[in-house]
Image (cartoon, rainbow, N blue to C red):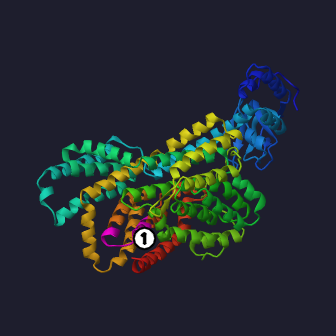
Amino acid sequence: MPAPSEPKTITRGYIRDFFKFSDSDEDVITLNFIMSHLVLKEYEHTRYICRAGDVADAMYFIEAGVVSVRGQNDEVINELDAGKYFGEYAALTGDKRMADIQAKGTVQVYELDSKILSVLARSNARIYSLFLKNAYAQATDRYRKLVRSLNSRRGMGNPGSQKKLTFWSLYTNYYLVALIFSVAMIVSISPFAEEQTEGLMHHLWLCSPIIFLVGYIVITKRALEAIVLAVMYLMIMLAKLNFISAFYGNVIGAVTETADIILLVILMGSLTRLFSASGSINALKYIAERRIKSGAGILFASFCSMVLIAIDEYLSVLINGACFTPLSDQKRIAREKSAMVMGMSPGALCIISPISLTGIYLAGMIAMSGGEPGMFFTAIPFNFTALLTVFFVLLLITGRAPLFGGLKKALSRVKEGGSLWPEDTDIEEEEGGANRGRVTNLILPILVFAGSSIITGTLEAGSFSVNVLYGMFITLIFTFFLYCFQRYMTPEQFFKNVVFGIENMLAPIVMFVVSKCFANGITEIGFSTWLNEIVQQLLGGQAWLLPAIIFGLCTLVGALFDNPWAMYAIGIPIALNLSVSLQGNPALYIGAVCAAGLVGNEIAMGDIFFIGPMLGINPIAYYRTKLPYVILITLLAVLGYMAAGYFVS
């Protein structure tokens, strides 16, 4: 240890500012206590201050020099210079170090023992909150990246496109849109639109909004923009020169009619964010690490975690990838296998969960398309792809799934002592520790949500319906007291997370509103009536085939869109209308549309570049591994809809 010298960087004023101390007597005493326990240490060039996997027994303040933060492959992922600090949260929680910290040149650091940190945190709520705030700041950057990608997957732009837009490309794109709108305007105000009531031109005129929507999404991959423009196109057909006023009125009407669903989505976003910020979900990792010894047990624990947090499929992938992928690696489970469990389960679970964002969206679309209350629940048994996916994942976990293709090769590779992950997988090391909360802080709010939703429900005409909106309000109030009284966050942090969660729900809300506008528009132009007549003419007495046809067409459209929410905006109103006109089972038809959205999303390649990195696997390798099983599930679902159409309808 070098001889003591007067610090130039980590001064008394630096520590006072770091811990946000005032000039009160209590804070002065605490500051003196900290200064007396700072230990100066010096490290020569290339020496390691701490190594990944070590138990964190101290935090460090850099007095002089530069340190390199190195990842798993010894690559430098960050550099910290004088005045910076590291290791604070891991030292406070006792977690293991997540990266190597190496001296770059001669480095002097002041070490503060983890026992001192624990004493400070227990005795001073403000210091504890400060460390939590730093943990939140680290987690928020990653969460924001998730939200940006999540919004892109739901229509707010194209996450896979990094191409710079030029003036010419913008001009060409919107010039063509303006030209199409102009032609539609001319046709709508001409005698043609009223005189043509049959024939090829009439059919094309009624189908033109669908053609425009599908073409725009396939070309641009911008689903939200496509639906907004398609609604504008419909307003031109309906209101002619007064289309702007009609568009405004349609949007206001849609917001008014769906205000309760919009509010529920907003609150759901806040609750999801609170779960993430509190670290309650991350606690599942530590329980599994201590108590589960087998690889199958780790994967089953991951599946149970996804059942428990079936609120948002992408957040579920992110959380389970971060928590359980390292544990599955410890059990020598091929990344392809763990990725299929953690990548395929969330979508299937969320699409049949009434409290997930997808479930709320689907239930809202069904209700605003004229479906009966509770139809979302009655459609769940007919969502064959979701049920088959869950069944397949359970077979995969227990080792009973048939092996072929990439999965068989991956298991053989690992069995022979090869790498856990496929070639060209970019393995990233986590920087810093995540907030380690309590699993009860996840389970209790969910139980309160379920219980309060049931208690505040209504019973009308022999039919019971839960009140999830009241339940959500009660749950947020309960969560406020639960988290703040345990000092997992301050009231200020609680409400900041609530607001942040509201911001994250922009994409689902806007997509939901414009989807309703589009559904209203295609009904008003007479498209639904025309389609009923065409289907009856084509199918004749073979209406039992219609559920399988709906499933196949919606799967194709969903894969082309690479966005199931946009497909639901078209498919659900049409399916409900056809079920009424053909006297079919509405739940079966809706189940076919929902199932198509799930499998279409799995067939499309857009998701893999989003989910692959979260699961620590080469996206292309992941896609090739799961595709044969997705195709098998799709074929089994087609047979299921043919059988259900024959026996149920």
Residue at 70% x, 71% y: name it: 415
Which SS does the magenta portion mostly show? helix
Closest to the observer, 371 or 404 = 371
Q: Percent position (x, y) of residue 83?
A: 71, 29
Q: Percent position (x, y) of residue 298?
A: 70, 63
Is residue 171 found left or right of 589 in the rendered image?
left
Residue 196, by quadrant, is bottom left
Confirm whether residue 486 shows in the render. Answer: yes
The quadrant in which the C terminus is found is bottom left
Closest to the observer, 30 or 498 = 498
- The range drawn in magenta is 578-593
Residue 311, by quadrant, is bottom right
Question: What residue is disc 1 on?
Answer: 588
Is residue 443 found left or right of 566 in the rendered image?
right
Closest to the observer, 35 or 470 = 470
Above or below: residue 476 compared with residue 561: above
Above or below: residue 411 compared with residue 265: below
- Looking at numbered disc 1 in the image, what kind of residue is underneath it? Leu
Q: Would residue 582 be counted in the magenta stretch?
A: yes
Q: Percent position (x, y) of residue 445?
A: 63, 50
Q: Would residue 38 be counted in the magenta stretch?
A: no
Residue 493, by quadrant, is top right
Is residue 58 found left or right of 130 in the rendered image?
right
The quadrant in which the N terminus is found is top right
Residue at 36% x, 78% y: name it: 544
